[in-house]
Amino acid sequence: MIYSRIAGTGRYLPEKTLTNADLENMVETSDEWIQTRTGIRQRHVASEDELTSDLCVEAAKAALDSADVTAEDIDAIFVGTTSPDLIFPNIATIIQHKMGIPACPCYATEAACTGFVYAISAADKFIRCGDLKNVLVIGAEIITKLIDWNDRDTCVLFGDGAGAVVLQPSDEPGIISTHLGADGEYKELLYYPVGVSNDLAAAGLGDSRIMMSGNDVFKVAVKTLSSIAQEALDANGLTIDDLDWLIPHQANLRIIQATAKRVGLSMDKVVQTVQIHGNTSAASIPLALDVAVRDGRIKPGQLLLFDAFGGGFTWGSVLLRF
Ligand code: UT7
């Protein structure tokens, strides 16, 4: 039996940070409101000339180094993002070219904040089939370029970044199981109103913004994140006590706390980066993973659970041994 396992991780965050104090000078808000309602203290914001693929390349280089492989070894790229450089070609092909990775399948997945979990689940299936040996999987966003900086409901929440992993075949898991889902019924609660076949002319005119019913999204997020965490454990005959680390999507500290409470997990076992990264959408889980791997909290052999939820709604959990 072939499994896939994470052989290396990496991350990249744009240099510029935006603090809550900075936002106090931009909209009618306060550090106190933002921290109390979201836990966020700061977020990273890409510069004008930075592209999502640039963030991906830096995160990917770090992941390749930690997996001790080179660009020539990579035989497929999977990227989860909602903020690609261009409509086409897809961002994975741009990354392939920038990194000098030989010709290979290049996939881009658009599943909002669940993008990385969708991407790693697909990559896992290819490796299990025996088709691929060194797969680069990235979650990345420059979501701040979709932000209306006058809209205090959303502008305080989001940040930019990229996280990457190298997946390799292994005789033992590695990834134990993945559990994906989506329900388009909830589109109206969280969406961006411009696309190729819908009002493309409005793009770039600055009159579009992320549409979000925060309260409703909050409630469905907590319910879904806790039920898919439990689903992954149940599917493998495990309990929450078996888990070493929960790595949830980092949208709001209160969502994370409520999810942990519902599944009966102490916050000591939850990797939290929302305070310093904000909501980086598809990048949030691989960013948090890399932070906790590099600071020594996550150790080889430990049982991890990725738990994601985003616009669509889309959702997914991944149970794995690191
Ligand atoms: O990535 C996955 C998708 N996104 C999410 O998961 C986000 C889910 N939702 C949330 O995180 C929270 O609902 C928010 C952080 C967006 C909002 O927190 P909330 O506790 O649900 O606040 P609220 O929307 O109920 O707003 C409470 C008050 C309102 O004022 P009134 O009507 O009570 O007078 C808002 O106008 O807070 C006001 N408000 C603000 N005040 C200061 C909203 N945004 C701000 C702000 N600063 N930035």
Image: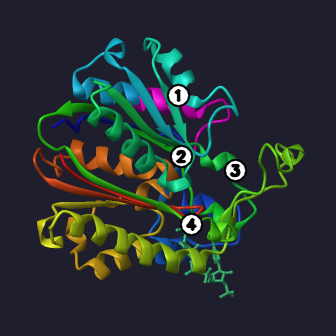
Does mark 2 have its CB less than 8 Å from ligand 1? Answer: no
- The residue tagged 3 is 146
Residues packed near mark 3 inside 10 Å, few (<14), some (14 to 19) or many (20 plus): some
**In magenta segment, residue 47:** yes
Q: Which mark is residue 160?
A: 2
Q: Which is in the foreground here, disc 1 or disc 2? A: 1
Q: Which residue is found at the position 57% from the left and 74% from the top?
A: 217
Closest to the observer: 110 or 19? 110
Q: Quadrant of residue 300?
A: top left
Q: Amino acid at mark 4?
A: Asp
- The residue tagged 1 is 92
Counting from the top left corner in percent of width and height, residue 88 is at: 68, 29
From what the image shows, is residue 319 above or below residue 103?
below
Q: Which is in the foreground here, disc 2 or disc 4? A: 4
**In magenta segment, residue 147:** no
Q: Which residue is found at the position 10% from the left and 47% from the top?
A: 301
User: Can residue 179 be seen here?
Assistant: yes
Q: Contact, CB < 8 Å: mark 4 with mark 3?
A: no
For residue 52, side relative to residue 104 (left or right): right
- The residue tagged 4 is 183
- The residues tagged by marks 3 and 2 sit, at their Cα atoms, a distance apart of 11 Å
Residues packed near mark 4 inside 10 Å, few (<14), some (14 to 19) or many (20 plus): few
- The residues tagged by marks 4 and 3 sit, at their Cα atoms, a distance apart of 23 Å
Q: Contact, CB < 8 Å: mark 1 with mark 4?
A: no
Question: Looking at the image, is mark 4 or mark 3 earlier in the sequence?
Answer: 3
Where are the magenta residues, as a range? 45-59
Question: Looking at the image, is mark 1 or mark 3 earlier in the sequence?
Answer: 1
Counting from the top left corner in percent of width and height, residue 270 is at: 26, 65
- The residues tagged by marks 2 and 4 sit, at their Cα atoms, a distance apart of 26 Å
